[in-house]
Amino acid sequence: MNSRKITLARILAPMTMIAPLAAGQRGVKPLVATSHGMPEMQKEQLPDGVYPEPLVRPDQRPVDSEAQAPASLTATGPVIDFEQIYFDRPGDGNLWVRGATYKARFGADAVEFVPFLGAQAPRNFPVRFTLESISVGETQLELARDVEPLHDGGALSSGGDVIYYDRGSVVEHYVIETDSIEQRFRFDRPLDVGGDLLIRVAVSSDLDCAGEDADGFCFSNELGGVRYGRAVVIDDTGWASTSPTRLVDGTLELEVPADFLARAQYPLTVDPLVSAFTADNSSQSTANPDVAFDETNQAYAVVWEHYFSQNDNDIWVQTHSTTGSVFAGSGFWIDSTSDNWLRPKIANNNRHDQFMVVAIEGGYSGQISGRTRDAGSINMGLQIRVDGQEIGLKSSPDIAGDPDLAPPTYYGIVWQNNWEEDDIDIHARVFRTDSVPHGPTFAIDGSTNHDYRPTISNSCGSYPWGSQRWTVVWTRQGADANTYGCQMNWNGIITEPSFPITTAAGSDLYPTVSTILDGGVGDSGSGPRPYLVAWVKGGDIWGRVMQASTPLTPETNLTALEGGSNQSNSQLTPAVESDGSTFVLAYAEARPGTSWDIFVAEYDYAGGQLYCTDPNRLAAGSTPMEINPMLASRHAAGGYWGSFMAVWHQINGVNMADAEGAILYSQSFGHTYCTSNSNTSGNVGHVRMEGSRSVANQTMTLTAEDCPALKPGLFFLGNGQVNAPFGEGRRCVGGAVKRFQVIVTDSAGIAYQPINFNANYAAGIAAGGPGVNYQFWFRDPAGGPAGFNVTDGLHVEHTP
């Protein structure tokens, strides 16, 4: 709870609530409401006239965007450190372990060892071990059943992590290594010697028992299997002997002779080894990545599937810096159980510095599940069920976050529900950051139409609160496939019920939607904000700028708008996002004689028109097929303008894929074209622009950084470029020069200047070529005899 005084209610645009379906309508469909009907919530407000400071730090500026190619980022299988052992309690009552060559479930009922037999394995082949009985001669030892497994990081063993069951008369240990599990039965108190000690462990598996050899027993098929080694018995002095080990009618029998028991010093340990072997475990495969950003930790989180077998995909997540490098130790499994998790999506909650992942659990006819993960650590919540267990087959989940720092904030989750063969609906639910639902499931569209493949915007957009909206788009199948949409506010109240986005002839497929643009002042904002919807039609990418349910542009062929030779190529799988001022589009394109590659383009919306400002920029062009890009904007998560991360997957053959990505810098805010000299801050001053470069939108802000603190200065602009000595620096701006008013840098040496289009200098800001050049002049008395210096120069081509 922040300390800002609550002075205003969070003001909302008019809301439309959809009435429940009448009794008997469409049969006995169990989900009957299109809004969960939660009471309107209030957010903490700022005092009148006070607005959030820009979430920008001096060390966050991007590299010169004109010279900066997309930063390479490889997020392939080898990024998962298989030399590390991962322990997890996901909430199913079991303790799970993931090693290099196996996963294992430790439950109160049994221990299951699941060997990794390659991504091409048709399914998992677990081997199940259950302690059946322990006897000494004719005496049966009492064993505690239904014991919870406990994890100890090495304290119970001379090395390695240990999972153990305290069964009273014996402690059942499992020493965990990356490629094996060492099973140990430890007896702490002397046993009454009335005969041989016999430990009986029931074993079951769909793997064939290949018989017995000198090393033990093998359970296998043509892909590999599990080896259970012969046991060794060791007493406290280190005296050891081979323990006779037999497999009798599906039960392993481990025997310790009575004469060994009589002479042993306790504790006494019986110690077999369980390990996996694979005919070919080289087929590590990852696919279907998604990405989100956390502002506080300056971290992108990338999530993707890892194929353990053909019916068991696990979900991995790791974090990357703003330049793409992996944060060491940040990787962990969202799911490493034997359940099949598919198509993960991820979003960020800025206030709580948290990510949440949703996915299909149980294959394509399964449920929608999710899990939270701290942005600054590997701490996670429990796995939860997201859908409300309504009748129908669930698929195509997606999730949106919230960049706001004022509470309450939520996640918005959508998915497809196949209610009947000819009736597919779009469902949604809102969740809190503690994994508790904020109300029941509700229908985004509960009509009798065939609505499928929903996508929700990455976030509800930046301040002001009153106009923040999540946008959902999907495909409606009719005579043609058309794109439909819906908007709801930050807590799931529907503000714009289902509306058509496309109506023209032809099939519109794979719709995607951006976060809304910045705009408006005051808590209520200035009404609905624009956003971009993109889709595939006839092998091209099409798009339309919308505002609430109102089209602002026609259905536009974005591929044609880009121009160039790519108009004759085929495009697929678009993803679109905004940084509050500009739109970035990523897509897969097939060029003649090459495979599918990933390209990006930028668009500005200004003056009622959509402009392509940076067409067909190659992000990935390797030989294998690259498809399905996803985008995250730092600004949509509460951070910096102009910086994005794209991820996609690369197909390398049957059952082989890699998750990959790149850091992208927007071209929208111009580029540096000449460099000045350093000043007494120790750096060369730098100038950049934020907001929209549209003259009509009038939301531009100039920022000067790396200047001396608390010194007067002023911005100036001109239509010409020079590079000449000027004070202690270099003047970059020439032509018809116009000056801004004098301002003072802050304690960090930063100066902010919102552009006032009613000021005299605004006459020098025009759209189109040759562009406008900006620079900042500042006093620097200790910097040299001239007593002043300047930043570098910034060239911007404004849109109308």
Image (cartoon, helix red, strand yellow):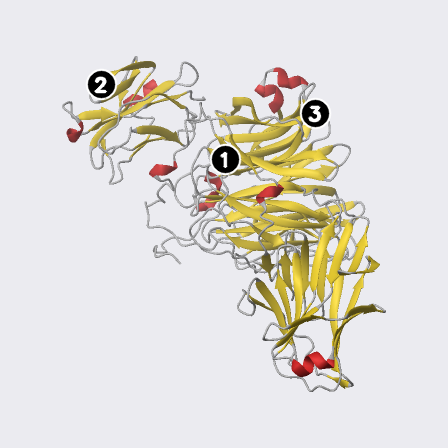
Quadrant, the N terminus = bottom left
Q: Is residue 729 left or right of residue 650?
A: left
Q: Which residue is mark 1?
A: 644
Query: Which corner quadrant of the image does residue 371 belong to?
Result: bottom right
Determine the residue positioned at 72% across, 62% down: 112
Marks 1 & 2, CB-CB < 8 Å contact = no
Query: Which corner quadrant of the image does residue 545 belong to?
Result: top right
User: Up-down: is 455 above or below 669?
Assistant: below
**Could you give the CA–CA distance between mark 1 and mark 3, rounded to whole angstroms?**
26 Å
Number of the label disc, if any, that sits on residue 726: 2
Looking at this rendering, what residue extends furthest in the right direction? 249
Q: Position of residue 518 (x, y in %)?
A: 45, 37
> What's under tag 1, amino acid-wise?
Phe
User: Up-down: is 608 above or below 371?
Assistant: above
Quadrant, the C terminus = top left
> What's under tag 2, amino acid-wise?
Phe
Q: Position of residue 537 (x, y in %)?
A: 69, 27
Q: Is residue 433 visible?
A: yes
- Answer few, some or many: residues within 10 Å of disc 1's Cα (few below 14, many 20 plus, some between 14 and 19): many
Front residue of this view, candidates 271 and 661: 271
Number of the label disc, if any, that sits on residue 539: 3
Front residue of this view, candidates 569 and 327: 327
- Label 2 element class: strand
Front residue of this view, candidates 764 and 1: 1
> What's under tag 3, amino acid-wise?
Gly
